[in-house]
């Protein structure tokens, strides 16, 4: 701690920070533009001027940029000094001299950092009489809208897009006072994190294009803390609603998970909530006419035995409610056997005690990273961004001795030049991370596993060595082993993407080899879906087992929870499965093939209309909260429906379970491995000063008019029985607990930049700790062990191709692809081949080949990927048109044109 | 037989006339107030807006007959009836004309004093039964105001009784054949008028209501026709006090040319309008000022007046 | 005492004064142009809707009786898809007019809006939009705004330079 004096008041502050961070941490309002807590300072905008004095007696002082000056002990400075204040005010006036008269039609208005800072400095009247500079805009794809006139040249966009996220196609053009931030020519912004520009840009140059289609100001949205549903990382998000439609997803800071940024799939994948194909009413496909929902349900639920199929995209509560309805022995995970097997293995490894499971934030600090059979950019995008930071951050260790502080971004980047941390990629095809990797291996999954085993062998001689490996591969394995062994914070990333247990085993062997007493290697696994870990922790048998059990014919009714089984197994198998039941109750929110098989189709709430808990890939239980009350009373959370079914069948017991909290309590007592999940967020009776936390900002408008067209008497606002949040603007206005933060706002700070008011220090963790609770996994016994053998090397088969699934950030996720913007970025179905294989089939790029996998036939255009080994083909994973393949798959490829 | 029929008819006619006049006073008051405030007042319903009274009555009848759940039900219902009944009983002794009066009691004046002070029960009971702090405060004020002003109301009239030598109201009227008692007893007239205003709780002495302090005082919880009874009671009180002033100080029905009942009515209306004028022009005193005024100023004056009158009477004899 | 008598006398003399009441509806009231009555949405000099759906009126409204949804046409011009004022809640404070950056929403000297059915006091855009510029003739927001929305191109505004050539390094 050092002591500084700001405006004659003494403060004890943390050393090593710059003045701007320090002032913000102390709660002082100091305007800034170019500084960003995740990206450091460059001193480009000249906005955060303060006066620093030589000593106590110095009255003159000198102006400095707060973001470019570190704190020193016994430092005297002034924020409110007239000269500094005037300087900041004039700086804004200059910035505003070319800023257009656009606020009324600008999407940033109301959450605009430039507006906030202009008001903060007191600049109110334009004195500059001369013409304003103008620019032409560019088309930037379905995610972002470009309005270049509004730019204030803070360089945040390119610093984020190019430097932080590794984008190639956004840059700064022209010179002098007319620099231009955009692409070389119109076109889609390619980077997977482009959506963050809408938040990074302090004004309205880059704005959310999907929000524009149903534009609502921030102050008019009903918002709730939520968790992204589109991959296993569980990034924290804020979801906003107006007039019964979900309008916008923004980042919710979680220091341990996603920090300041989320990927575009998470930001733009929300539109499925507003899909016209939503299931909105219960549908009964029963022969007996004239029975209402409850008559037919009571018939179905009481006749014969029930089998329950859970889902990795449904919340813990929903899966548990289903398990209680059908009984523990009749509850099955709705995922294929091999996927279940992989998840069991991963959980066994994570609970083995030999490896460390890192949080997403920790992965940003790895010094050597090995990615084994994963393409994080597409399977867990935010992890790819974290790995980029690991690579960028590592060289900073080397300059720790220099006297340039690490927040001085431009200077340290200049100093480290092209130095990079070590990242090694092993994946069948090129990935976006290859460009920053110090080495990459493109091989079949079996060979990637063997490569991993080889690394384990080189670290720990006792580990078995795979035989018959190419010397060149062995050499790179030795090099990676060497790096990992020397590393202080080694990280191995693996996962389920390639559906190969040997790769996971290899990753574990490496982790085990690296274990030295207390110091454990970090092993980060990418899982398939948002609640895969939670479902797997329930330790239920897989869908294949359910199919086997159903063959016996002892089940009369299947209850399928938020799961399209046609994506999980081959169509004919699923058809046979359904034909064994008299009735089938499907609970889902979107119309799909499984829903069409239902005897009774029950509409359920999406993440925006209900509450629930998800367990992410590091087994962090996180609560997402209901954003808005669906207009239709039939749309309820799955767990509510399922629990009603149970009460309905067993006779109503009103004293039992009414709320989410009770269900979680029972979940934890039934399955101690979930201990901690009930603490992911405060209980529903939590109040501050007897008040709830309002979901709506205090400027929320239109309360007496928005429903006036229906009935002029305002209805009572909906009440929330499941959470401490309220659906109105009334409630506690201070700082809510971190898991309950529905939006970021602070007096004078309307934009998301107000986040620092919620943090214990600028850029640090949230006050009261980052949300989410790591599950202990107590009492889990994973029977199938941590043993595995080294697989034999991949060999090309003459008659059939081995297939690997290639996930795509836009397209492979079931829900996000229902968003029109994400769908627009989704690839069409294709088959990736090496040119050797293509030549053999007389095919070239784009020619159509027929692929037969089991009973399914696909006609696919060829995409050449020469890095693929011969005999191995890549298929895009789980595109809507190509689901239902059992991975790992083999297929016969023919050229029907011949 | 004939006698009974005659009196029954008289009672019915007087009762009907009084209540009707009391009702139209609502209109008169609103029109007069408007006149003094440069407005028109109710002028839409019927000729000169006279039917506003009918509209008001219909409105009152159609209001929800609401008894608050926390109120003492029986007393709450009973209280408004007392005020109207007590005032109407006082009219028994009022000589509208030599032959138009119900009972020419020899203790007429005492009967009037007794009956008019009964009215306060309605306020006290209504306020108490409402079980509401504002009502109770209003009721307490009403009671103390009544006690204070009743004293010198009686005292101020004693001078007149001394001069006329009778409590019988017809005797008092007849005693004014030569000159009205307002001439011989001016002080008593002023005191009686003041006390009368206080007695009827009219502005500026509407302390038990005092809407700017006590919501609506003792009748805060009343609505519909029960409130209407208080209302009617108040207007009947105005008529009564005006009639008594006329009887005691302004020669009652005495007057030239016109028939006696017309004289009586004319004189009475002058005072009714004077009541309204007071409401239009005077602000309400504070409660403590009212009490101080009553006990420390008016009471001594009343006693003094009695003493002087007594002295004169002695000397004269 | 004298003052009491004096005020009684003065009040009595008011009997002979002229009455101030206007006998509405037979006699009409003369209202100022800035009277805050019925709210309208005006058009710009070219006949286009002035409202750009910025939500400031709704935010300024102390009784929250304005609700709208912004949308845009093919040129990027913003306009309200619906615009609703619940006049049964409106207090005619005029804050919406003050907040409006485009002079679109204006209060007019008309108060004769009585209805027997409260539901009829909910005005939709077609009830609010008039074919007039209202109190502020000549103003067209899109002529002075920076963005191009089919009214003027980039750099064609009165106070704008032509668009920057981003391939040029000439100062």
Image (cartoon, coloured by chain):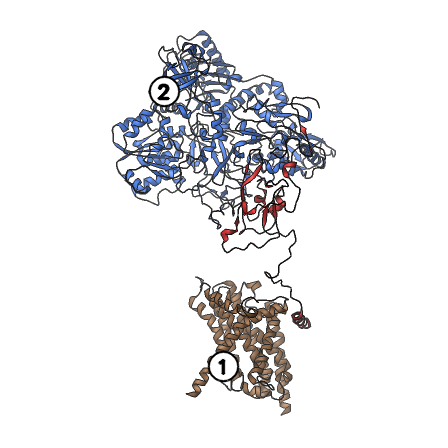
Chain colours: A blue, B brown, C red
x, y percentage for residue A801? 38, 14
Number of other residues with Cα within 10 Å of mark 1, as a class: few under 14, some 14 to 19, many 20 or more: some
The chain that hosts pointer 1 is B
x, y percentage for residue A586? 35, 34
Which of the 4 image quadrants contains residue A273? top left
Query: Nearer the viewer's eye, disc 1 or disc 2?
Result: 2
The answer to whether residue B249 of the structure is visible from this angle is yes
Which residue is more in the foreground, C126 or C20? C126
The answer to whether residue A649 of the structure is visible from this angle is no
Residue indicated by mark 2: A857
Which of the 4 image quadrants contains residue A592? top left
State the separation of the CA atoms marked 1 and 2. 112 Å
Residue indicated by mark 1: B92
x, y percentage for residue C10? 67, 70
Q: Residue at x 65, y 51 (%)?
A: C34
Residue lying at the far right in this picture: please name it. A60
């Amino acid at each position: 701690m050092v002591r500084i004096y700001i405006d004659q008041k003494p403060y004890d502050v943390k050393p090593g920070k710059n003045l701007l961070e320090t002032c913000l941490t102390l709660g002082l309002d100091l305007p800034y533009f170019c500084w960003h807590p995740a990206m450091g300072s460059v001193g480009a905008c000249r906005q955060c001027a303060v006066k620093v004095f030589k000593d106590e007696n110095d009255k003159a002082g000198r102006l400095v940029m707060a973001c470019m000056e570190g704190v020193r002990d016994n430092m005297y400075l002034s924020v409110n000094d007239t000269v500094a204040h005037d300087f900041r005010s004039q700086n804004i006036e200059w910035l505003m001299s070319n800023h257009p008269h656009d606020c009324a039609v600008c999407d940033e208005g109301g959450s605009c950092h430039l507006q906030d800072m202009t008001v903060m400095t007191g600049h109110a009247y334009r004195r500059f009489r001369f013409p304003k500079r103008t620019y032409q805009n560019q088309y930037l794809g379905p995610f972002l809208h470009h309005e270049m006139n509004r730019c204030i040249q803070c360089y945040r966009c390119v610093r984020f897009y190019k430097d932080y996220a590794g984008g190639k196609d956004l840059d700064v053009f022209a010179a002098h006072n007319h620099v231009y931030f955009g692409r070389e020519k119109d076109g889609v912004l390619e980077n997977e994190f482009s959506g963050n520009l809408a938040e990074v840009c302090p004004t309205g140059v880059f704005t959310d294009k999907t929000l524009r289609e149903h534009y609502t100001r921030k102050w008019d949205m009903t918002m709730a803390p939520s968790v992204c549903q589109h991959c296993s990382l569980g990034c924290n998000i804020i979801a906003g609603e107006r007039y019964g439609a979900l309008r916008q997803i923004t980042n919710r800071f979680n220091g341990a998970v996603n920090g300041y940024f989320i990927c575009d799939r998470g930001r733009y994948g929300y539109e499925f909530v507003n899909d016209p194909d939503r299931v909105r009413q219960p549908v009964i496909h029963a022969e007996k006419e004239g029975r209402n929902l409850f008559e037919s349900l009571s018939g179905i639920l009481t006749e014969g035995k029930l089998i329950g199929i859970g889902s990795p995209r449904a919340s813990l509560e929903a899966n548990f409610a289903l398990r209680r309805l059908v009984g523990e022995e009749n509850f099955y995970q709705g995922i294929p056997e091999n996927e279940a097997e992989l998840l069991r293995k991963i959980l066994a490894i994570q609970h083995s005690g030999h490896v460390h499971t890192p949080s997403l934030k920790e992965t940003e600090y790895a010094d050597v990273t090995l990615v084994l059979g994963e393409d994080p950019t597409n399977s867990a995008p935010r992890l790819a961004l974290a790995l980029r930071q690991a690579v960028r951050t590592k060289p900073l260790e080397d300059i720790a001795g220099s006297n340039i502080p690490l927040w001085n971004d431009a200077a340290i980047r200049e100093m480290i030049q092209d130095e990079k941390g070590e990242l090694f990629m092993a994946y069948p095809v090129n990935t976006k991370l290859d460009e920053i990797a110090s080495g990459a291996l493109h091989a079949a999954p079996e060979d990637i596993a063997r490569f991993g085993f080889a690394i384990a062998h080189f670290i720990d001689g006792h580990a078995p060595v795979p035989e018959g490996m190419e010397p060149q591969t062995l050499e790179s394995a030795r090099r990676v082993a060497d790096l990992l062994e020397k590393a202080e914070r080694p990280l191995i990333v693996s996962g389920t993407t390639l559906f190969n247990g040997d790769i996971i085993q290899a990753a574990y062997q490496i982790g085990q080899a690296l274990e030295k007493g207390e110091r454990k290697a970090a092993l980060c696994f990418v899982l398939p879906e948002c609640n895969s870990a939670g479902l797997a922790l329930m330790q239920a048998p897989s869908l294949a087992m359910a199919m086997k059990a159903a063959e016996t014919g002892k089940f009369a009714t299947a209850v399928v929870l938020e799961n399209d089984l046609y994506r999980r197994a081959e169509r004919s198998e699923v058809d046979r499965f359904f034909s064994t039941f008299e009735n089938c109750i499907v609970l889902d929110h979107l119309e799909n093939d499984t829903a069409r098989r239902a005897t009774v189709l029950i509409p359920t709430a999406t993440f925006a209309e209900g509450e629930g808990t998800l367990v992410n890939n590091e087994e962090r239980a996180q609560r997402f909260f209901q954003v808005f009350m669906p207009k239709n009373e039939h749309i309820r959370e799955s767990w509510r429906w399922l629990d009603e079914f149970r009460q309905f069948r067993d006779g109503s017991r009103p004293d039992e379970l009414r709320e989410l909290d009770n269900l979680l309590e029972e979940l934890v007592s039934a399955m101690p491995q979930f201990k901690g999940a009930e603490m992911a967020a405060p209980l529903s009776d939590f109040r501050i000063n007897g008040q709830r936390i309002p979901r709506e900002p205090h400027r929320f408008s239109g309360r007496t008019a928005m429903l006036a067209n229906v009935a002029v008497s305002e209805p009572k606002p909906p009440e929330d029985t499941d959470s401490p949040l309220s659906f109105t603007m009334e409630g506690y206005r201070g700082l809510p607990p971190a898991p309950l933060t529905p939006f970021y706002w602070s007096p004078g700070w309307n934009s998301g930049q107000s986040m620092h008011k919620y943090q214990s220090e600028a850029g640090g963790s949230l006050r009261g700790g980052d949300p989410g609770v790591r599950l202990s996994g107590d009492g889990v016994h994973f029977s199938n062990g941590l043993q595995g053998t080294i697989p034999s090397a991949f060999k090309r088969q003459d008659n059939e191709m081995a297939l690997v699934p290639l996930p795509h950030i836009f397209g492979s996720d079931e829900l996000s692809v229902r968003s029109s913007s994400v769908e627009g970025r989704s690839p069409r179905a294709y088959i990736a081949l090496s040119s050797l294989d293509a030549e053999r089939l007389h095919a070239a790029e784009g020619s159509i080949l027929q692929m037969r996998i089991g009973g399914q036939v696909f006609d696919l255009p060829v995409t050449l990927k020469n890095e693929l080994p011969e005999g191995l083909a890549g298929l895009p994973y789980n595109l809507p048109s190509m689901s239902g393949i059992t991975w790992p798959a083999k297929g016969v490829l023919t050229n029907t044109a011949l | 037989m004939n006698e009974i029929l005659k009196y029954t008819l008289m009672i019915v006619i007087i009762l009907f006339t009084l209540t009707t006049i009391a009702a139209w006073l609502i209109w008169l008051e609103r029109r007069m107030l408007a006149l003094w405030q440069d407005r028109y007042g109710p002028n839409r319903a019927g000729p000169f807006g006279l039917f506003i009274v009918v509209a008001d009555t219909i409105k009152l009848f159609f209001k929800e007959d609401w008894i608050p759940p926390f109120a003492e039900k029986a007393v709450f219902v009973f209280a408004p009836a007392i005020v109207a009944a007590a005032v109407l009983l006082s009219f028994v002794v009022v000589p509208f004309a030599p032959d138009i009066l119900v009972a020419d009691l020899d203790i007429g004046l005492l009967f009037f004093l007794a009956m008019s002070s009964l009215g306060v029960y309605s306020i006290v009971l209504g306020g108490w039964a409402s079980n509401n702090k504002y009502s109770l405060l209003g009721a307490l004020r009403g009671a103390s105001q009544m006690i204070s002003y009743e004293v010198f109301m009686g005292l101020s009239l004693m001078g007149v009784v001394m001069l006329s030598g009778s409590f019988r109201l017809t005797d008092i009227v007849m005693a004014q054949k030569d000159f009205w008692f307002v001439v011989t007893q001016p002080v008593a007239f002023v005191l009686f008028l003041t006390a009368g205003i206080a007695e009827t709780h009219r502005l500026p002495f509407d302390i038990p209501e005092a809407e700017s302090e006590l919501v609506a005082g003792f009748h805060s919880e009343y609505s519909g026709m029960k409130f209407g009874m208080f209302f009617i009671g108040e207007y009947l009180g105005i008529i009564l006090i005006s009639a008594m002033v006329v009887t005691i100080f302004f020669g009652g029905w005495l007057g030239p040319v016109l028939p006696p009942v017309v004289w009586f009515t004319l004189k009475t209306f002058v005072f009714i309008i004077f009541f309204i004028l007071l409401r239009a022009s005077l602000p309400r005193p504070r409660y403590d000022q009212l009490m101080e005024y009553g006990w420390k100023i008016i009471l001594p004056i009343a006693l003094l007046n009695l003493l002087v009158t007594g002295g004169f009477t002695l000397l004269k004899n | 005492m004298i003052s009491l008598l004096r005020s009684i006398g003065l009040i009595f003399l008011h009997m002979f004064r002229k009455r101030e009441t206007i006998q509405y509806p037979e006699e009409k009231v003369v209202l100022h142009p800035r009277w805050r009555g019925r709210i309208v949405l005006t058009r710009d000099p070219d006949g286009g809707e002035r409202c750009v759906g910025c939500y400031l009126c709704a935010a300024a409204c102390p009784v929250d009786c304005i609700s709208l949804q912004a949308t845009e046409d093919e040129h990027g011009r913003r306009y309200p898809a619906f615009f609703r004022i619940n006049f049964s809640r409106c207090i005619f404070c005029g804050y919406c007019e003050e907040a409006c950056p485009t002079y679109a929403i204006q209060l007019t000297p008309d108060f004769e809006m009585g209805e027997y059915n409260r539901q009829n006091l909910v005005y939709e855009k077609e009830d609010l939009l008039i074919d007039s510029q209202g109190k502020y003739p000549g103003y067209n927001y899109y002529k002075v705004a920076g963005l191009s929305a089919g009214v003027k191109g980039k750099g064609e505004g009165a106070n704008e330079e032509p668009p920057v050539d981003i391939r040029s390094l000439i100062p």
